[in-house]
Amino acid sequence: MSNLMEIENVSKIYGPLKALSGVTLSVPQGQWLAVMGPSGSGKSTLMNIIGCLDTPSSGEVFLDGVRLSELSPGELTAIRREAVGLIFQQFHLISHLTALENVMAAQFYHSMVDEREASEALEGVGLAERAGHLPSQLSGGEQQRVCIARALINHPKLILADEPTGNLDELNEKLVMDILHKLHREGATIVVVTHAPEVAAHAGRVIVLEHGRLVSDSVGEAPSGGAGEGEGEGADDPKADFSEADGEAAVLNRPGEEGLEKNTDFSPEEIRARS
Amino acid sequence: MFLKMVFKALTRRKGKHLMIAFTVALGVSLATAMLGVMFDVGDKVNQELKSYGANLNVVPRGSSLVGEKYGFAEGESDAASSNYIKEDELYKIKMIFWAYNIVGFAPYLKTEVEFLGKTAGVAESAGASPSGEFPEFSAADGRILRPRSGLGREGSEDAERAERAGHGERAGHGDRAGRAESAASGLSGEPGAFPGEGGVVLTGTWFNKTLKLPTGEEVEAGMLPLKSWWLIEGEGASDLDAHGALVGRDLAERLGIRPGDSFKIRSAKGGEFTLQARGVFSAGADEDDQIFCPLALAQKAAGLPGLVERVEVSALTTPENELSRRAAKNPDSLSQLEKDTWYCTAYISSIAYQIEEVLPGVRVKAVTRVSESEGPILVKTQLVIILLTALTLFSSALAVSNLVTAGVMERSAEIGLLKALGATDLAVSALVLTETLTVSLFGGFFGYLAGLGFARFIGLSVFGETVEVRLMVIPLSLVMVVLVVLLGSLPALRALLRLKPAEVLRGR
């Protein structure tokens, strides 16, 4: 299948700090990718570059075949608007707008406001009854679901989620992950940045960054019901691939994949310990 | 959706937005008041200048006008003043086309008399005084003084007085000292009747007179309304008091006259008159060396019954332009249409022309130092107001700038989010500007209303009457609000454009 995103030897330097160092990565259409690593490893920098919120110091990024380094800030904004849906750990809802209006705001800056479509999006995340509530009247999980509805309203090709369950309890974490699974089954390409091995375990592929370098790239079975093309056969419980195998087997290396450092003994527990 | 976002943002951050509205209201109120005053100040200054004296001088055609044109004081024109103006024709000045623009007028007849000394009471005798000598008088401090002619003073002394009175242009008259001898000959009565150090100038006038026009209408005339800047100590003179007089400060000091004192004078014709000083005045000019008395008394002293030698007229006029200047040179050079336009406009030259029409045998000249000073005073006043307005608006813009920038900083996460969602810099700037502009227009509206009040206050406290704020101030206030908002929002917009969503959304 075709790659939605290709990253070639990307580096990002902030003064004396090398946040990313020669990262090369391809993300096929429909893949669910988890980006892991300890704090300061370059996860967020990579996400910002993928989401057109930042530009690399060197290297090339292709999103849906478009070379991002050739684009002006305005064109990058347009790509972000058209192709990327952003989910934040802190939800970042506009506090004086209702849940419905928050979703419609994304429509407004994309194209046309369609209240019916925005309501359906909220219904899709189970918040039809809460559409008229302000963020302050919603729980953390509900706010995150509004954030997801807003990210999806413009039908982006790529969904970028930054610690999507970082501020949620277990119940809401499950709700959010269920929504991501549903999206993945529908063919969405998802990149999730997370510290949590439990969250990463839902992904079909996990990469690990350390000191700005890609130290591990593991492909497991496709998440349940996901498109999973090119990632092996689907599994009913993807979490089991990473969390139930006592760490060691959770990270799968793909022998023979070019440009990647092999890391056969890397586990989520180890990442947690490093973090 | 845009308006909904603006409205909800406005209602959510009421405190901050009220501060912006208040700041703009304050700036606009002051600017409105000042602009209101500026547009009305022309009329106000015009009226104020009118209070500084007459702007037209009516003299017999036979007298020299050189002195008038170049601002020489009264009585200095050459000796050809054999012609006079009839007092009973002066009412016609209030019957010209621009009669309502004539705000006041007063006749003068000047004669030189001999001061005989203070007396106990008021009396009049037709007998001549045998004495040709002036007595000596004691001043209040005990010094021995001799009366001197007011026209023979040293130039430097004259210049000093002119400076004190703020009439700087008169300082140049100090060179008249050398001409003092001949100047006295310009007075009515016998030329050089009291040569040497003797002689006091007695000027007859209407102090405050009510005239009855043939139409039955009554009009006020007289000198006192024209000399509103005179400081008078004492009860002041009246036309009803045939022997009441006002004595100039310098003369009163020299002669030891105080308000209420009676004194005796003798005219060149030989008549003796007793006057009572109803007041001592300070004019800051040549008049401080003169005695002002009712016109009839001066006419009797000069032997010129029913005659005056000069009339001062104060008229509200329209600023001069090319047409009026051409007409002033020669009215016959104008086409009929131009002449009609000129005649029907309250130019100082057309009013002068109309007075000459009703009073044949007179010549009317503009007192240029009054009429010409109007323009520069007006321009300078307006310049000061414009500068103050600009400073006020700049201060408001600075305050708005701080508030809007602080607001943008506080909302950086929200603005970063909008950018992350795909909003362009222009779209986010438009959102912030619309919010600020809406709040500012709200504040500007109340500022405008407050400005009307300020303008009233300024008008009443400075000019003694309300200022009419022109309609033109409304669009100007609107422009000011927009300017303040744009200027004040520039730093905020700059900060907004520099804001990187990746940084603010992650709390960096």
Image (cartoon, coloured by chain):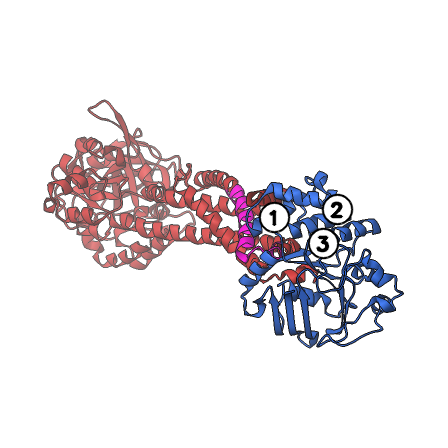
User: What is the C-alpha distance between the residues marked 3 and 1?
Assistant: 27 Å
Give the image location of residue B111, x and y in percent. Answer: 21, 42
**Disc 3, disc 1: CB below 8 Å?**
no
Q: Earlier in the sequence, mark 3 or mark 1?
A: 1
Chain that is coloured red in the picture: B
Disc 2 secondary structure class: helix
> From the image, which quarter does the N terminus of chain A lie in?
bottom right
**Disc 2, disc 1: CB below 8 Å?**
no
Magenta residues span B418-444
Residue ID for mark 1: A105
Would you say B395 lies left or right of B504 here? left
**Image mark 2: chain:** A
Amino acid on which disc 1 is placed? Ala
Please name which of the two marks, 2 or 3, marks the residue nearer to the observer.
3
| Residue visible at 12% across and 41% down in the picture | B83
Inspect this view and state whether residue B9 appears: yes
Instruction: Verify whether residue B439 appears in magenta.
Output: yes
Inspect this view and state whether residue B310 appears: no
User: What is the C-alpha distance between the residues marked 2 and 1?
Assistant: 18 Å
Amino acid on which disc 2 is placed? Glu
| Residue visible at 55% across and 48% down in the picture | B436
Q: Quadrant of the rendered structure where residue B313 is?
A: top left
The residue carrying pointer 3 sits among few (fewer than 14), some (14 to 19) or many (20 or more) residues within 10 Å by Cα, namely: some
Nearer to us in this view, A58 or A153: A153
Residue furthest to the top in view is: B216
> From the image, which quarter does the C terminus of chain A lie in?
bottom right
